[in-house]
Image (tube, grey):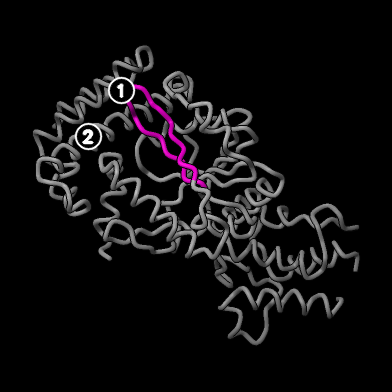
Amino acid sequence: MDEPVEEAVRSLVRSRAPLARSRAELADDLPLGAGGLGMDSIALVEVLLDCEQRFGMRSGSCSGGWKPADLLQGPPLTVGRLVAHVRAALGS
Amino acid sequence: MILFDELESRLAGLALRHPRPVLSLAAGLGSLRNRLSRRWPDPEQVRLLFPSLTRSEAARAAWRIAALEARNRLLVQCIRRAGAGPARPLVRVSSETFAALRPPLLLGTFHVGAIHALGPALERLPGPVLALRQGRLYPAGPPVEVVTTEGDEQSRAAVFLRALGHLQSGGFVVTALDVAPGPGLAVPCLGHTIELARGPFALARLAGVRIVPLVARWRNGNVEVEVEVETGEALAPAGEMEMAAASARWLESYLLASPAETGLGLLRSLLSRPS
């Protein structure tokens, strides 16, 4: 994995999720919302916007397709899914 | 009181055919029910919220709040059965009211007055409208799209992201300010505390748009939609608490001028939370 991207995403998650700050590690399968870091709807959107800003991505403008709305559909959004999506969008 | 429930349930079918007189009849029944029972609301509850009212003024306000509730209940039944069609001809919007509104804009509603009659009014806004509400009351058509805010945090995040995109692409978003699905923003209102939803204020902050209060009130058996446009500093994009406090001040001012527009649920919610 691209360490800087992965670490940056995890750092953004930590900054938005108070429950993440006391954890030494954020496992890939840890949900950001219910049953995991307990982020509410606004925090979930804010972390996606943080990723956009941090990596200069805009929806549909990246090679792999940064599609934040897709991340919120279907199964619970986990740390690993978010990292993988960002990496795919950046083509890294 | 069972008699009133029975009468009210029979009015829905009739109201679909003759909405104006039947909705007025429902209001009359609601008022009469309050005069007989002195409940829903009790005039003393009204005075707790509006202490400047005399006992007789509070009693009249209570009658009118009960009438408002009865008329709203019947309108909701009609809309559930037949969509917005029966309500549409009842709603009047003055040409200046909506013409002054320019998207992107967040229109914030409160549970006051004829809130359920706002749906048909939204069709007349000059731009695409995304309305957020808890559950769908009826299937709306273009230019209005209604999405539900029901569901878990991730589902609500999806709706929130969609609303943000809608504002960023120059549309109107309409949402209630006084329904907080989770922890809200507690701000003073009418000597009590009101908990406003955080979502609309976060949305306004992130999109950098103003919030304009939108209300409707029953008038002379018809529904006249009134839009109060606040262009002042208070509701301009700012910190969430600042915007929430400004919205609550606007609501307070509106209800002090028209106590009988207070929805029963809002009245109870305010009374349950002293300042």
Could you tell me the amino acid type at mark 1? Asn
Foreground of the two, B257 or B163: B257
Q: Residue B10: image x %, image y %?
A: 26, 20
Foreground of the two, B42 or B233: B233
Q: Residue A9: image x %, image y %?
A: 75, 74
Give me the residue at 80% from left, 67% from top.
Answer: A84
B246 in magenta? no
**Label ID, residue B68:** none
On screen, residue A24 versus residue B17, left or right, reads right
Question: What is the count of numbered marks?
Answer: 2
Could you tell me the amino acid type at mark 2? Arg
On screen, residue B135 versus residue B206, left or right, reads left
Q: Residue B263: image x %, image y %?
A: 30, 42
According to the picture, the residue beneath numbered tag 2 turns out to be: B64
**Label ID, residue B220:** 1
Crowd tier of the residue under label 2, counting other residues whose Cα lies within 10 Å: few below 14, some 14–19, many 20 or above: many
| Quadrant location of the C terminus of chain B in the rendered image | bottom left
Q: CA distance from mark 2 to mark 1?
A: 13 Å
Image mark 1: chain: B
Are the residues flagged by discs 2 and 1 from a single subunit? yes
Secondary structure type for disc 1: loop
Q: Which residues are magenta?
A: B212-229
Q: Residue B81: image x %, image y %?
A: 42, 23
Task: Determine the image quadrant of residue B225.
Answer: top left
